[in-house]
Amino acid sequence: MNLTLIFGLTTFWSAFLMFWLELFFAKLLLPQFGGGAAIWTTCLACFQLLLLVGYGYVHLLRMLPIGFQRWIHGAAIVTSLLFLPVQLITIETLPSSPVLQILITVLVSIGFPMVILSTTTSLLQSCFSQTQKNPYFLYSLSNLGSLMALVLYPTLIEPRLPLSTQSGVWSIGFILVLFGVVFCLFQTKMNSSDVRSVSTKQVRSSWQCIQWIFYAFIPSSLLAGITTYTTSDIAPSPLVWSILLGLYLFTLILVFCPIPLIPPSDFGPVILVFSIAFLLMEIRSPSRVSSDFLTANLVIFTGVAWVYHARLANSKPEPSALTEFYLFQAIGGALGALFNAIVAPLIFTRLIEYQVVLALALPLLLTPAEGWKQLKRSPITYLNRHRWMAPIGSLVIITFLIQSPSAWGMKVERSVRSFYGAYQIGTTENSRILLHGTTVHGQQYLSSGAERIPGSYYAPGSPVANVFQQIPSDAHVAVIGLGAGEIATYSKPQQDWTFYEIDPLIVNIAQTNFKYLAQMPKPPAIVVGDGRLKVTESQEVYDTLILDAFSSDAIPLHLLTLDALEQVFLPHLSERGTIAYHITNQYIDLEGPLERLANATGLEGLVKHDRPNSAGHLSDGSPSDWVVLTRNPAMSQALKADGWQNMKQGTSVWTDDFTNLYSALKRKTKSG
């Protein structure tokens, strides 16, 4: 029997299952924690910690005689079967911190199977090295299996397999991997004394271990950072996660394959120039993610990860010390992810950890290159000659990043951050502005006569103003997403209003920095928690339901599924009720998916794309797109008179099992 084939297939399939599980479980968590960008960042930290536990376990296991290794790992394999099928385990009592909630939920639900899978690569490589063959190709196979999972999950598995079916199929695959691991373990022929002599050999200096940690820290932190940077404006989903994580793994595959592809010597300085240009633009004026910025950052992130992973591969030890190598690599990866998930929100009030770590990575991008040396007056040549300046330059850039101005050039009065987002409150010449990330989430005019006049997306004549002109004066209104509370200007004395807001910090901002809630003729009820979950728990029935929830510019996708509409919102909607969706987004066109929801539920759907300076709209109102699904023929007739139109046909109904984000991507950014 071909042992190389068995070892390779087991390693490949184990990695495939591990990354399938990561995407599957993170998708399960999205509706539980508001669908925001920080969910995946926290999951990455959890997964990196579990990987570290697995590598540490293997490193200690290899110090034991082979017989003990087999019995101990066999017992661990049998124990892991108790956690099948994998599922989200609900825990009654959890800490108030969402990060700790996610950490505990991941550990309890899938922690043990994840640790078992994380041991496969290093354990089988250690066993395979005893055949006197180079085991590092198994690491490339592991990364290739991971990459295949990232490609196939959003394109094949997620669209075709419901979440419940995925759990069962994955569990069968996991059992097959366990058989493969047991078989490979029993191919090890070493005696116990040989194992101890190899395992206990002192091979590394402290400086080498620190280098391994740093080389792994930078790409790991950048991965978490660019994912948050991107999904703050593009909805978090397995598709986006897979693309970014795939680029990260691709660089590992390049440098650890049997014939490694190492970046040329002049590649690092080129990426250095692009990185500095991006960071200088961020210092000058932090902006929302644009298509050009996103493309440039994908190139920068991939380039930096390739350079650092190449340094990691070039410093790998002989096979006898590979468990130690993987252990310190896992420490660096875990520290990078934990920095973004836990440390950065505590020390930065804005989402700048991606930029800060990119600046930290700059010095090691400077590598001697013969081609550049011939250009005596080039910037790269100058930097190479004065390499001692690179760390100082990084510190200067980081300092300016921390002190950089607001994206809107406003005078910042308050800058705060929570798990759900980073917020800035400040004033312009005539308004107080609330920024969530780089997106305006509310404004209030400063002059006393205009304090109750809404602006931004809610200005007089805007689509949402059209809706409120048609609802009864005694309507029961629910709004998911509070922001600055600007929409409250449309409330009337006889109406009952309820706001559902997931972030307690936003509630505090709306109550202390803005006056809209205090100016309401009748105090509203404010329910803190995810809107979908809290509406489900409610006994109320609403005449008008406004879905105005955003994370920066991204709309939580779990609010836009057929499951949410049929099982949550429609049961709490009156017989002649109306649901209004705020769908303004630079990248995602949600009109089609919502048309499919209207068609599936028998509701009439209308859309209005509003732009500044249109009829009846304030000159400084913001562009906005709104969709209405209604049971009320009179409402739809009145809205059509205000310029609302029938919706364009969508391609597929979105469900909790699958949201086809790719089909909703805007091929061209709309102007205005």
Image (tube, helix red, strand yellow):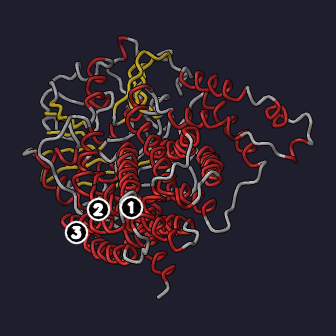
Type of amino acid at the residue the image marks with label 2: Pro
Q: Earlier in the sequence, mark 3 or mark 2?
A: 3
Indicate left or right for 345 with 560 as reference: right
Q: CA distance from mark 1 to mark 3?
A: 15 Å
Q: Position of residue 157 (x, y in %)?
A: 38, 71
> Residue at the bottom extreme?
1
Residue tagged by mark 2? 113
Visible in this render: residue 641?
no
> Residue at the top extreme?
448
Type of amino acid at the residue the image marks with label 3: Val
Task: Tell me if residue 429 comes above or below residue 158 in the rendering.
Answer: above
Task: Describe the element under mark 1 as helix, strand or loop.
Answer: helix
Task: Tell me if residue 423 comes above or below residue 642 in the rendering.
Answer: above
Mark 2, Cα crowd under 10 Å, few <14 / some 14-19 / many 20+, is: many
Q: Nearer the viewer, residue 469 or 408?
A: 408
Q: Say which mark, if any, is on residue 119.
A: 1
Q: Say which mark, if any, is on residue 78.
A: 3
Q: What quarter of the picture does the C terminus occupy?
A: top right
